[in-house]
Image (tube, coloured by chain):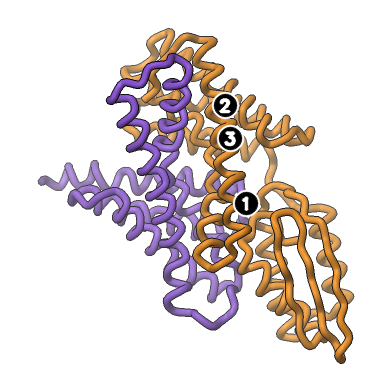
Amino acid sequence: MGVVEILHAILLPMMVAIVPAVGFAILFNVPTRFLKYCGLAAMIGFGVRNTGLFFDISIEFASLAGATCVGALALYWSRRFLAPTQVFAVAAVIPMIPGKFAFGFMVALIEMNLHNHYEPELVTQALSFGLKTVFILISLAFGIAAPRLLFYRSKPAV
Amino acid sequence: MLQHGADSKLAETTVHRLCTALGADWADIAITANSLMLTTVSNKEFLTKVRRVVDRGINLKVVCDVAGLAEMVERGVADEYEVERRLRQLSDKPKKYNRWLVAGVVALSCACFCFLFGGGLQECAVTLVASLVGMTVRQQLGHQHVNPLINFAVTAFVATTIASCGVLFNIGEQPRIAMAATVLMLVPGLPSINAVSDAVEGYMSMAVARWAFATLLVMATGIGIMLAMMTTGVWSWV
């Protein structure tokens, strides 16, 4: 486990993850002054997730940890700048969204139907993709919501 | 008015704070999938209104500004006329980023996804071109108020067709990664995250409605991908 390996597995994806986060933040029309925070949160969250994956933690728990970091950061910033949490959080978890699994599930299902072949491998693949999608999505959303649910139980959402 | 992509809890608390700060004794709202009921109590007089909620696309700037407005009113910086003026301004002219800028950065994002999946530079270039064209199509259709489901299907079709050219002409080592990364721009991230966070906070009906809509969007995208694969004959995607 050399330094180069760590660099390649964790740091490089962290840097690359900033671009989609800021890109989707622009798509969601986040105000310009908050864009850099989106990027920063995405970088940290994705870094946490990749560190988890690097140490062979399952992807769901790694995503949960990453999303919790994003949620905590977003909560802190939302107090500080008086803006809703989603402004920071949603764009920041975009790099962690299991898009590949979701569409893999979809395509496998349609392929099963279209070509009328139900080999065990294909069915297993479809099922595992589908389950991964659902569980990762739930852990992401729960991770974002968790800090708010834990620390600010009776205060307003902003 | 908050249905530009805010979750239900945020909508409820913001409306409550805005109304109480403007002089009502109490305000409650009930949110359903496409309408919103608001009751205010002021000197034991009740005032109830039902408003239709149209999905006008995700725009977190509006959400952010309305929340900021509530904050301003609570601190006494803005009065009711100011609030009305600002809200009208927000609903009439939502400020948006330049569409070419949006298309460009989204395409760049997809290229980065391609890199994260382990694609090389050539695959990334294919992804960039395909998602740029796809995004332009999506914006054009969205501009003409096409149903979002049809919009997503058409966009997925166009983007996948272009990306599968990479497979046909053997650009790069693993051209299929480009196909996978291109359609990632169509993942309904915000609806699905809002769905789960609504569910966690106890707004069950909204959560189910949002989840169903997100699933339908994914289905529409899947149909688009499928059509493209049938046309180009590039199969087995992952």
User: Image height check: is A145 above or below A14?
Assistant: below
Q: Colour of chain B?
A: orange
Q: Name the residue that disc number 3 marks.
A: B104
Q: Residue at x 30, y 44 (%)?
A: A12
Q: Do callouts 3 and 1 point to residues on the same chain?
A: yes
Query: Of helix, strand and loop, which one carries label 3?
Result: helix
User: Image height check: is B165 above or below A12?
Assistant: above
Q: Name the residue that disc number 1 marks.
A: B209
Q: Chain of mark 2?
A: B
User: Image height check: is A59 above or below B172?
Assistant: below
Q: Do callouts 3 and 2 point to residues on the same chain?
A: yes
Q: Colour of chain A?
A: purple
The image quarter in which residue B100 lies: top right
Q: Give the image location of residue A36, x and y in percent.
A: 50, 57
Q: CA distance from mark 3 to mark 1?
A: 32 Å
Residue type at mark 2: give it. Answer: Ala
Q: Is residue B78 left or right of residue B121?
A: right
Q: Residue at x 85, y 68 (%)?
A: B49
Q: Quadrant for the C terminus of chain A, please.
A: bottom right
The image quarter in which residue A127 lies: top left
Q: Residue at x 63, y 64 (%)?
A: B8
Q: CA distance from mark 1 to mark 2?
A: 23 Å
Residue type at mark 1: give it. Answer: Ala
